[in-house]
Image: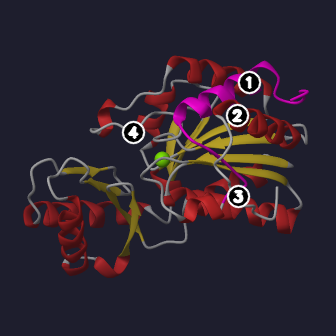
Amino acid sequence: MSPKTPHTGVSTSRERVGTAAAAARRVLAVGPSGLFTDIDGTLSPIVAVPEAAAVPEPIKLALATLAERLDLVAAVTGRSVEEARGMVGLDRVAYVGNHGFERSSGGCVVVHPDAEPYVPLIAETLRTIAEEVQAPGIIFENKGVTASVHFRQTGDPETVRATLLDAIAGGPHAGELRILEGRFVLNLLPRLRLDKGYAVEELAAERGLRGAIFIGDDVTDLHAFKALTRLHQSHGLATLSIAVLSPESPSELVGATDLALQSVAEVGALLAALAVDPFSGDD
Ligand SMILES: [Mg+2]
């Protein structure tokens, strides 16, 4: 769908899911087609501690059915591929982890070769800022080729965020890394032209997709939404971008997508409807 239209927000949950399902079927009917989805805040409700996040069983069941019937179902996340696979738990799903810096391939994890040299730089930077910024509730997570610092649980998230940004800017390798901000999280990434959008475009090309859907909830998903726009405008793919909104949603999300759902539960209802019939429907 294009161009982007404003989301009025006056519909009921049932109407939003019905509209999204109808639009999704129109895209998936253009085979080969794929469903790309973020995980946290999209398939799994946001929780205080990242390790406690889980994908509800009904969503896993719907994804399992869709992975059988569609040419591609891919989970595209800032988490590592291992973590993503652990949360979704489906072998037939493709996993793109670490914001596009690694992906699953035949049961293995393949790190993008350009990103490999950044592993020690990420580790050293994380060690340095962990020594410098100490706040109760802060979580430093080394994910190999990227790192995340979660500050949702700190007493004063805005101050902690500002202190972290200063520490990263003054830390080692600042010029070789970039920061990608999410919901109460700062992600440290190699300064390379790789992101969720690049990964979506790469997978869509590899699989020869003619239809593609992306569902996501955060600023890190904006790259993927833009990638769908490029795939539509430059390569003629049928595409649908769906935002999952919450009180924490970044404002850019609405203008960057075709449709919006209001919760992970609505994503679950959409996936369940598509699992019953991904390609056609009278709604
Ligand atoms: Mg997310």
Which residue corresponds to mark 2? 17
Q: Which mark is residue 125?
A: none
Label count reads 4
Q: Position of residue 77 (x, y in %)?
A: 50, 47
Q: Nearer the viewer, mark 3 or mark 2?
A: 2
Q: CA distance from mark 3 to mark 2?
A: 26 Å
| Mark 1 neighbour class, 10 Å CA radius: few under 14, some 14 to 19, many 20 or more | some
Q: Quadrant of residue 47?
A: top left
User: Which residues make up the magenta segment?
Assistant: 257-283
Q: CA distance from mark 4 to mark 1?
A: 23 Å
Q: Looking at the image, which residue is at 91% across and 27% down?
A: 282
Percent from the top left, x then y, of residue 125?
Answer: 22, 67
Q: Is mark 4 within 8 Å of ligand 1?
A: yes
Secondary-structure class at tag 3: helix
Task: Judge whether 278 appears above or below 238 on screen.
Answer: above
Q: Is residue 104 left or right of residue 21?
A: left
Task: Tell me if 1 is positioned left or right of 241 in this view.
Answer: right
SS of the residue at dot 4?
loop
Q: CA distance from mark 2 to mark 4?
A: 20 Å
Amino acid type for the residue under numbered disc 1: Ala
**Real-space Cα distance between discs 2 and 1?**
9 Å
Specify the amino acid type for callout 2: Val
Query: Along the horizontal axis of the image, is 34 left or right of 244?
Result: right
Residue pictured at 21% horizontal, 77% vertical: 166
Q: Badge 4 is on which residue?
A: 46
Q: Give the number of the disc on residue 273.
A: 1
Q: Is residue 74 above or below residue 102?
A: above
Which is nearer the N-term, disc 4 or disc 3? 4
Residue that lies at the very extreme toward the front in this rendered image: 10
Residue holding disc 3? 201
Viewer-side residue, 33 vs 257:
257
Q: Earlier in the sequence, mark 2 or mark 1?
A: 2
